Image (cartoon, rainbow, N blue to C red):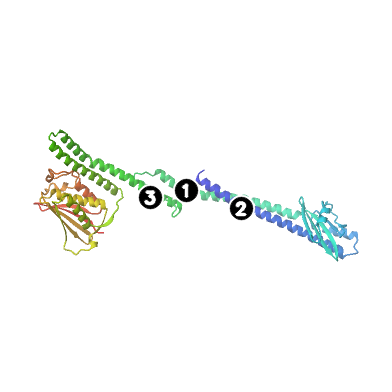
């Protein structure tokens, strides 16, 4: 059973049952009211007849018979009996309706129990005990309420047709409302069926704003966004791994083949040492690729850091590894405060970029020295990494940030030609950039520019 049918059946059933219960309650109340009203009329008729009999002493039988003829139609199909205190019949109406159990009714009546009401089929039987002029009298009336039953039957027909009419109206309203409610769900279901996880599908849109269905569509869009991010990460990771690792792995295989053919054990050990360093570099590349893939798929998490504190930490690390190398950190002449040095970056990625730049300073420096200059501006901060060594020619510089490019100054130095590519990507993800400059003689300068926090 679909949602529309459930709404139709549930709403219609509950409403019709409630309306039917209300109409039955009305019919029952009217039936009780008819019965009580008719019984009161019987009591009044008994009292009126008894009063008439007791106040008029010298009345003959012809007059009583005439009175019966006149009043016979007051209560249709009636039998009225009046007894004295000795329970002797003193009056009987001319109607021939039999009164069953009259003896038992007389026995139940007394001054302590002056009223007795019962039914004989559709007839109402009412007995009373009353005193008139210090004398006790008993009256029994049995009658059929043709007028009351006629009204009750008419009411039953009216209520029946009312229930039928309300049922039809409720079904039509429920059919309309269920269709209107189910339309949105069917519409969203159709959109979900056409939805794909390639990131090209249009987000699910609900025609009803602010209701539960719209909330469901919103949550589905959020779920699909996360799914697309996961697929994007997978696609980027595969793309990066296949593209970036192909050449480094080929280099490693080639080095291993040369080690395998080298007969000199001393050279083998030296080559294995370099191979271990290259393997570590490859591991760093893989970690960088993972981080870059995450950020490119929309998962860049950042925090506020002071750039000089991060550089100081890296200087301590490199000093422990290369104690012969000296880094000098300087600030520009402009006044500094903490806000001028605070940037919003991904700690792991940005630390990797700075580490690569400082490793380049160590690897390509001629005098084991490098200077780092921090220059904060109004909106951006600039950091220059300068060392003395062989410079790149003007022909090589345009290819510096391309994959696997290695300049003439890199001969005899380990590496895969990917470090500067990763640095450029990381800075681009943070809204910054990196550039290279040279004085044309022996000074190399890499400059990074980042927006302040």
Q: Is residue 204 visible?
A: no
- Callout 2 secondary element: helix
Q: Is residue 145 above or below residue 269?
A: below
Task: Decide which of 245, 58 is in the foreground and name it.
Answer: 245
Q: How many circles with numbers are drawn on the protein?
A: 3
Residue indicated by mark 1 = 183
Mark 2 or 3, which is nearer the eye?
A: 3
Question: Which label belongs to residue 19?
Answer: 2
- Image coordinates for residue 330, horizontal then vertical, percent: 16, 59
Q: Earlier in the sequence, mark 3 or mark 1?
A: 1
Question: Which label belongs to residue 440?
Answer: none
Mark 2 or 1, which is nearer the eye?
A: 2
Residue indicated by mark 3 = 222
As measured in the structure, the alpha-carbon distance from the residue carrying label 2 to the one carrying label 1 is 28 Å
Q: Are marks 2 and 1 in contact (CB under 8 Å)?
A: no
Label 1, residues with CA under 10 Å away: few <14, some 14-19, many ≥20: some
- Callout 1 secondary element: helix
Is 219 on the left-hand or right-hand side of 291? right
Label 2, residues with CA under 10 Å away: few <14, some 14-19, many ≥20: some
As measured in the structure, the alpha-carbon distance from the residue carrying label 2 to the one carrying label 3 is 44 Å
Identify which residue is drawn at 63% across, 54% down. 22
As measured in the structure, the alpha-carbon distance from the residue carrying label 3 to the one carrying label 1 is 22 Å
């Amino acid at each position: 059973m679909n949602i529309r049918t459930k709404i139709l059946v549930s709403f219609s059933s509950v409403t019709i049952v409630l309306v039917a219960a209300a109409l039955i309650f009305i019919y029952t109340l009217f039936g009780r009211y008819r019965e009580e009203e008719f019984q009161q009329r019987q009591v009044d008729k008994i009292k009126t007849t008894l009063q008439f009999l007791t106040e008029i002493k010298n009345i003959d039988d012809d007059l009583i018979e005439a009175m019966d003829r006149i009043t016979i139609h007051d209560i249709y199909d009636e039998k009225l009996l009046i007894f004295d205190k000795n329970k002797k019949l003193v009056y009987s109406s001319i109607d021939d309706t039999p009164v069953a159990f009259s003896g038992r009714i007389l026995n139940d009546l007394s001054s302590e129990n002056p009223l007795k009401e019962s039914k004989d089929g559709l007839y109402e039987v009412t007995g009373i005990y009353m005193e008139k002029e210090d004398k006790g009298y008993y009256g029994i009336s049995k009658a059929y309420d043709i007028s009351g039953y006629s009204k009750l039957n008419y009411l039953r027909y009216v209520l029946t047709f009312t229930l039928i009419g309300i049922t039809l109206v409720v079904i039509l309203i429920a059919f309309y409302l269920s269709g209107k409610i189910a339309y949105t769900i069917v519409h969203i279901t159709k959109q979900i069926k056409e939805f794909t996880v390639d990131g090209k599908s249009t987000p699910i849109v609900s025609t009803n704003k602010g209701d539960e269905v719209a909330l469901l569509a919103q949550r589905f869009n959020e779920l699909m966004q996360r799914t697309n991010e996961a697929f994007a990460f997978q696609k980027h990771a595969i793309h990066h791994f296949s593209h970036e690792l192909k050449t480094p792995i080929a280099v490693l295989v080639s080095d291993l083949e040369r080690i395998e053919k080298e007969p000199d054990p001393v050279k083998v050990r030296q080559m294995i040492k370099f191979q271990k360093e290259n393997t570590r570099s490859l591991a760093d590349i893989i970690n960088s690729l993972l981080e870059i893939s995450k950020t490119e798929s929309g998962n860049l998490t950042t925090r506020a850091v002071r750039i000089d504190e991060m550089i100081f930490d890296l200087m301590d690390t490199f000093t422990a590894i290369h104690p012969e190398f000296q880094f000098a950190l300087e600030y520009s002449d402009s006044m500094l405060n903490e806000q001028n040095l605070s940037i919003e970056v991904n700690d792991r990625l940005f630390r990797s970029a700075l580490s690569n730049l400082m490793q380049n300073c160590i690897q390509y420096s001629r005098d084991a020295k490098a200077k780092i200059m921090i220059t904060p501006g109004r909106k951006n901060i600039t950091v220059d990494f300068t060392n003395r060594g062989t410079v790149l020619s003007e022909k090589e510089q345009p290819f510096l940030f391309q994959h696997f490019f290695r300049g003439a100054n890199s001969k005899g130095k380990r590496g895969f030609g990917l470090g500067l590519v990763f640095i450029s990507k990381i800075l681009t993800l943070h809204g910054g950039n990196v550039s290279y400059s040279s004085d044309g003689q022996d000074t190399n300068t890499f400059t990074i520019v980042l927006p302040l926090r």
